[in-house]
Amino acid sequence: MRHIKSPDPLKFDDTQPSVFLAGSIEQGSADDWQSLIVSALRNADITILNPRREAWDASWPQDIEFAPFREQVEWELEAQERAHLIAFYFSPTTRSPITLLELGLAAGRRRSVVCCPKGFWRKGNVDLVCERYGIARVATLSELAEYILNFRGTLTA
């Protein structure tokens, strides 16, 4: 497994399996679910693209002119465009507006899988988008990791 975290350079072989971990971060206040997925995939031959930034500062302005913010968003957009699979997680304890935006960008255009447990405030919307655009859904983080492992063989473009 290769694990690339933002803002590290996205230097990886695009012909090898890769997954972008899209989901609840809430400027660092959400549980670190990405670590659970990374741990579950530790023996897999896959590149994990993880947007959870160690040195994120929630006080940073969300402004296109603020270099660290711009760097983060551009890193995430490029990583999603290059990933073979986008794995979404919507934590029931968050609102996750950026994850909702990312799902909208991916719907119908990118290979995706969604984990949206009961209790997420817009679960109905997420489920309907998944149903309409044929996006696979799983119920738990364990199932999300399992889906990624089983999907690996079909990740190549």
Image (cartoon, grey):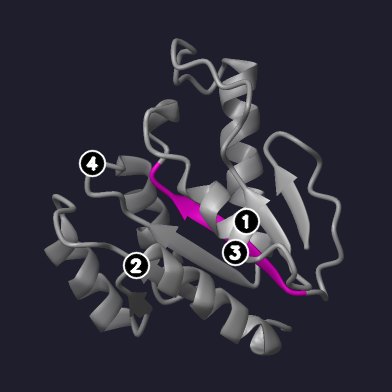
Disc 3 and disc 1 in contact, CB within 8 angstroms:
yes
Secondary element at tag 4? loop
**How many residues crowd around disc 1 within 10 Å: few (fewer than 14), some, or many (20 or more)?**
many
Q: For the C terminus, which image quadrant?
A: bottom right
Instruction: Determine the CA span between mark 4 and mark 2.
Output: 14 Å
Looking at the rendered structure, the kind of residue marked 4 is Thr
In three-dimensional space, the C-alpha distance between marks 2 and 1, rounded to whole angstroms, equals 15 Å
Q: Is residue 37 left or right of residue 92?
A: right
Q: Where in the figure is residue 50, as x and y percent of width and height?
A: 62, 48
Residue indicated by mark 4: 93
Does the magenta segment cover residue 23? Answer: yes
Mark 4 or 2, nearer chain start: 4
**Where does residue 104 sit, x and y in percent of width and height?**
35, 60
Mark nearer the N terminus (1 vs 4): 1
What amino acid is at disc 2? Answer: Thr
Measure how far apart labels 2 and 3 are at the Cα level. Answer: 13 Å
Lower sequence index among marks 2 and 1: 1
Q: Circles 2 and 3: CB distance less than 8 Å?
A: no
State the CA–CA distance, disc 3 to disc 1.
5 Å
Q: Residue 139 location, x and y as percent?
A: 30, 72
- Above or below, comparing residue 40 to residue 121 in the picture: below
Q: Mark 3 = which residue?
A: 40
Q: Residue at x 38, y 49 (%)?
A: 99
Name the mark on residue 38. Answer: 1
Q: Quadrant of the N terminus?
A: bottom right
Q: Which is nearer the N-term, disc 2 or disc 3?
A: 3
